Amino acid sequence: MLAAGTSADPLAPLRNLGEEGVNCEAYLRRARAVLQDFVARPERIPFADLKRDPKAYTRNLLFGDDRLSIWAIVWPPGSSTSIHDHHCSCCFGVARGALEERWFDAIGDGRAALTNIAVREPGYVACMLPSGPNIHQMRNRGDEEVVTVHIYGFDHTQKASSIETEYSEALR
């Protein structure tokens, strides 16, 4: 985990997100600014220390408190998430490599139909609130490892994941 409370603390702008008076737009602006800083200066990410699995994406907790958790996720070639949405805010930035993001619309019975595919290159940052639907899937379709940084609005000690609902892909 990253050191907290130091002048070099890259997460300092997020530490007061739970304070009264901070609205959704302010939270998203702060989260976006932190992620933009991370992906602009990836040397701040401890790449060599990140856990890896050659067959599946691996989440590495960088920081967590009772309001948010920040993860570096390592994506080996061929890895992907399920098709899912989130119970909390979800912001992410691409620090290394390119990741495919696929967007879906729920069509009932736990199924979702593909609506869009985009490649997210290094430096890309996105933020969304759980007001959804924000149904997506992330995949490493390339031959190289990808590293992303995610900020989720949940207490990592209370929930194991930011995923709310998982879907199966409906074929058209």
Image (spheres, rainbow, N blue to C red):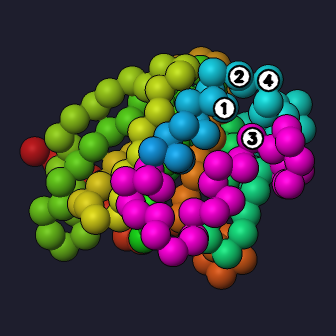
Residue 59 image point, x, y percent: 69, 51
Which residue occupies the extreme front position in the image?
21
Q: Amino acid at mark 1?
A: Phe
**Badge 2 vs badge 4, beta-carbon distance below 8 Å:** yes
Q: Amino acid at mark 2?
A: Arg
What secondary structure is found at the residue carrying circle 1? Answer: helix
Which residue occupies the extreme bottom position in the image?
158
Q: Is residue 120 left or right of residue 144?
A: left
What secondary structure is found at the residue carrying circle 2? Answer: loop
Q: Is residue 25 above or below residue 162?
A: above
First-in-chain label (2 vs 3): 3
Disc number for residue 43: 4
**Badge 2 vs badge 1, beta-carbon distance below 8 Å:** yes
The part of the image, by quadrant, that contains residue 167 is bottom left
Disc number for residue 38: 1
Q: Amino acid at mark 3?
A: Pro
First-in-chain label (3 vs 4): 3
Identified at 14% across, 69% down, the residue is: 108
Residue 54 image point, x, y percent: 73, 37
Q: CA distance from mark 4 to mark 1?
A: 8 Å
- Asked if residue 122 shows in the view, the reply is yes
What secondary structure is found at the residue carrying circle 3? Answer: loop
Q: CA distance from mark 2 to mark 3?
A: 11 Å
Disc number for residue 10: 3
Q: Is residue 39 above or below residue 19?
A: above
Q: Is residue 42 left or right of residue 77?
A: right
What secondary structure is found at the residue carrying circle 4? Answer: helix
The part of the image, by quadrant, that contains residue 156 is bottom right
Disc number for residue 41: 2
Q: CA distance from mark 2 to mark 1?
A: 5 Å
Q: Is residue 163 left or right of residue 13?
A: left
Residue 78 image point, x, y percent: 55, 33
